[in-house]
Image (tube, rainbow, N blue to C red):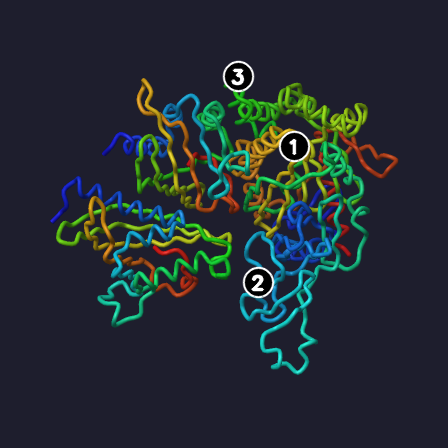
């Protein structure tokens, strides 16, 4: 069932906030948006049904995500020195109403790192739990268009 | 759609349709258009900028674009300004911007976070500051002729 | 073979388009000549470092504990990993992220993990150092070659550009500030150095910004940044006879400078406003009135240091041209603060560079476009030779070995290619 306009608007604002926190490298605040039992999943293959029967690019709990972003803030991490910068672009946001809301959006992700610009495109989806006037993310899944591309791909810094 | 969102989308369309004089009209008389080089750059006096222009100088830029006799726009660019993620807080709007530019057989992409500071004037809502933080402001860039 | 590419009155298009010529330039010029690396103010304290380019290589400029400078290849002596990734910082030692080989700030090896695995760990190498590093009044140059003339001799007649920049500072020093702008174009690096002293192109290439500024006379009465921009755009609209009056000076070693052509308002060499008056007073306090006036009267515009630097002392700006391929170039633009001058002067410096040298500049963008058109045109072999005779009859040889000519002469291009030929031939 499509969400009413007011709800759709609040969900969209929430998703835009998540994207901006990542762009601004405010990782601590970003993780606050996630429920403690949340899952973050970036499948490797487009048609992948489950993270349990195939390798994934990311399949992480909030605790693992916390380690991931702590490392991004560690000056010694060779992967992210100098700091990379990203922009997330979300459009075509849709929301389905229910006990848990399901939101979907088109994603473009631009990364600038060591004088090189990289683009990823995909579809993101979220399961959201209403919490007061806002939400918590129970699950996020990002299906990248080119997740199984061979080369130059396997180093990711800032989450999608 | 709120008035602020409508303004940002209209601005993007005026640029894509090369209606630069109308685009300039969206800016208040004391407005500034700014593309810094650095992330979190606090002021145009602390580091170089790709563009830092008050409206009076932006008018010269627009005049040049309107005359069409500039080498760097012969042939002209075609662009798509893709605005998304608009968040409005009072008289400030933040958004994400992708500009796809196609010119003389070459395509390129710009990615940025944009801040608009707005003010209500008698003629309507006008832009007081447009700040474009490119994801790669410090990187080498080929000539940038069309406003982002 | 290389000599046959330069005829005195013409140059073969291979000089711009042939990858083999580019490779030879890299070997014989960019691996031998003195090249600008960085400014000492970027590494003021022991342990400070910056990453820089030296010809084709990435190098680390480090301030050692003893106050001296080391210039090291950014490449671990073990497996070859890049040691430093951050563009600048401060460190007590250099440590490879891969297997933690650790080096002193002079590049010598402190130690390696599992040293007992080597029969003779003392024989392991440190970081490779660049053989020659010298500073001219704070400007650090280096050469990949252990042999060659000393830096002051290399800079020759263009030492005066650095001297004038330092003379312009009330405190006697400059400080690099404001980050940098990077311009990229799909064209040969020499085009930038030729264009910087070509006084015929502005009337044609920059016509659109001249006319746009003429259509907005109110800009000249607007806020300072707008006045500065409008005056700069309008200055490119001189008549050919006026350009002819701007002198060009060519010095042995391939260096060239051109005279000034900004005559009005905030960009004139001796403008009148309260900020400039405060600056002038500070300069008089350092030099005395007579010398201060002489220093300010030097109104040169671009000073080109062969092979790849352009300095503008009056505006505290410098451009360094980095060749990437025969048809691909990046230009880095940096600024210097005149220590002891009013802060408003530094703002003007940044604004001038934003307006004149950014990839979005109304002026520079058209130059970049023209370089790309030249490169595409030169790829076609219809006519193998590029004429460079304009103004040759007016060249005046001076007693000090320099050559002077009128502003519209192609003297700088002929002179740069004479030097180019000499470096490539040996």
The residue that label 2 is drawn on is: C82
Residue placed at 31% from the left, 60% from the top? A62
Secondary structure under tag 1 reads loop
- Among the 4 quarters of the image, the one containing residue C86: bottom right
Element on which disc 3 rests: helix
Q: Is the residue at mark 3 from the same chain as the one at mark 2?
A: yes
Going 61% across and 71% down the picture, which residue do you hit? C78
Judge the density around disc 2: few (<14), some (14-19), many (≥20) Cα neighbours within 10 Å: some
Residue C217, numbered label = 3
Residue B60 is situated, as x and y percent measured from the top left of the image, at 49, 24
Task: List x then y, in percent, for residue C21.
Answer: 66, 55
Whichever of callouts 1 and 2 sits on the residue coming sooner in the sequence is 2
Rendered image quadrant of residue C277: top right
Instruction: Look at the numbered disc 2 and give the secondary structure of its residue.
Output: loop
Marks 1 and 2 sit apart, C-alpha to C-alpha, by 35 Å
Pointer 1 chain: C
Q: Residue furthest left?
A: A1
Left or right of A98, for residue A158: right
Q: Are marks 1 and 2 in contact (CB under 8 Å)?
A: no
Same chain? Circles 1 and 2: yes
Q: Please, which residue is most extreme toward the right here?
A: C399
Q: Mark 3 and 1 residues: CB-CB less than 8 Å, in contact?
A: no
Q: Which residue is mark 1?
A: C315
Residue B6: x and y in percent read: 27, 32
């Amino acid at each position: 069932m499509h969400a009413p306009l007011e709800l759709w608007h609040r969900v969209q604002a929430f998703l835009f906030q998540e994207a901006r926190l990542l762009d601004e490298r405010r990782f601590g605040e970003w993780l606050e948006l996630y429920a403690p039992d949340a899952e973050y999943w970036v499948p490797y293959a487009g048609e992948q049904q489950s993270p349990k029967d195939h390798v994934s690019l990311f399949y992480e709990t909030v605790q693992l995500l916390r380690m991931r972003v702590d490392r991004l803030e560690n000056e010694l991490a060779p992967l992210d020195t100098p700091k990379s910068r990203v922009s997330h672009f979300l459009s075509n946001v849709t929301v389905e109403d229910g006990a848990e809301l399901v939101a979907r959006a088109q994603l473009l992700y631009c990364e600038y790192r060591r004088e090189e610009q990289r683009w990823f495109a995909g579809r993101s989806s979220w399961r959201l739990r209403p919490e007061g006037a806002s939400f918590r993310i129970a699950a996020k899944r990002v299906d990248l268009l080119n997740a199984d591309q061979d080369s130059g791909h396997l180093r990711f810094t800032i989450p999608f | 759609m709120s008035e602020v969102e409508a303004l940002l989308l209209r601005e993007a369309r005026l640029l894509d349709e090369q209606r630069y004089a109308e685009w300039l009209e969206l800016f208040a008389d004391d407005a500034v258009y700014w593309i810094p080089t650095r992330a979190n750059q606090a002021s145009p006096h602390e580091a170089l900028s790709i563009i830092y222009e008050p409206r009076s100088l932006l008018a010269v830029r627009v005049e040049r674009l309107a005359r069409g006799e500039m080498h760097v726009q012969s042939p002209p660019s075609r662009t798509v300004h893709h605005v998304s993620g608009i968040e409005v807080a009072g008289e400030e709007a933040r958004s994400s911007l992708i500009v796809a530019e196609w010119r003389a057989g070459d395509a390129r992409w710009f990615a940025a976070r944009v801040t608009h500071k707005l003010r209500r004037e008698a003629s309507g809502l006008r832009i007081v500051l447009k700040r474009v933080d490119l994801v790669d402001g410090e990187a080498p860039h080929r000539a940038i002729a069309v406003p982002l | 073979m290389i000599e046959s590419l330069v005829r005195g009155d013409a140059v073969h298009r291979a000089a711009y388009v042939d990858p083999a010529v580019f490779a030879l330039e890299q070997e014989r010029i960019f691996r031998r000549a003195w090249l600008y690396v960085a400014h000492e103010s970027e590494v003021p304290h022991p342990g400070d470092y910056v990453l820089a380019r030296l010809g084709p290589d990435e190098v680390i400029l480090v301030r050692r504990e003893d106050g001296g400078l080391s210039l090291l290849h950014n490449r671990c002596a073990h497996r070859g990993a890049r040691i430093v990734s951050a563009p600048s910082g401060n460190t007590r030692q250099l440590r490879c992220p891969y297997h933690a080989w650790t080096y002193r700030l002079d590049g010598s090896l402190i130690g390696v993990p599992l040293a007992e695995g080597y029969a003779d760990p003392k024989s392991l190498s440190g970081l490779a150092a660049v053989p020659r590093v010298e500073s001219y009044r704070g400007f650090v140059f280096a050469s990949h070659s252990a042999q060659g003339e000393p830096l002051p001799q290399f800079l020759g007649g263009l030492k005066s550009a650095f001297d004038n920049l330092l003379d312009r500072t009330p405190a006697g020093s400059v400080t690099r500030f404001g980050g940098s702008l990077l311009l990229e174009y799909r064209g040969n690096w020499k085009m930038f150095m030729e264009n910087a002293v070509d006084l015929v192109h502005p009337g044609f290439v920059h016509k659109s910004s001249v006319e746009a500024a003429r259509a907005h006379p109110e800009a000249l009465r607007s806020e300072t940044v707008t006045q500065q921009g409008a005056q700069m755009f309008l200055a490119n609209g001189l008549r050919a006879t006026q350009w002819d009056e701007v002198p060009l000076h060519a010095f042995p070693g391939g260096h060239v400078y051109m005279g000034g052509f900004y005559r009005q308002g905030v960009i004139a060499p001796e403008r009148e406003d309260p900020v400039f008056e405060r600056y002038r007073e500070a300069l008089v306090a350092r030099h005395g009135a007579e010398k201060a006036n002489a220093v300010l009267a030097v109104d040169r515009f671009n000073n080109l240091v062969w092979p790849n630097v352009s300095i503008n002392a009056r505006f505290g700006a410098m451009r360094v041209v980095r060749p990437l391929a025969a048809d691909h170039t990046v230009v880095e633009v940096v600024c210097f603060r005149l220590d002891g001058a009013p802060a408003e002067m530094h703002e003007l410096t940044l604004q001038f560079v934003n307006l004149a040298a950014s990839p979005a500049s109304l002026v520079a963008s058209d130059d970049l476009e023209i370089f790309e058109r030249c490169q595409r045109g030169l790829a076609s072999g219809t006519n193998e030779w590029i004429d460079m005779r304009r103004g040759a009859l007016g060249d005046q040889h001076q007693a000090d070995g320099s050559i002077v000519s009128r502003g519209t002469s192609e003297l700088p291009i002929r002179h740069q290619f004479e030097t180019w030929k000499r470096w490539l031939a040996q």
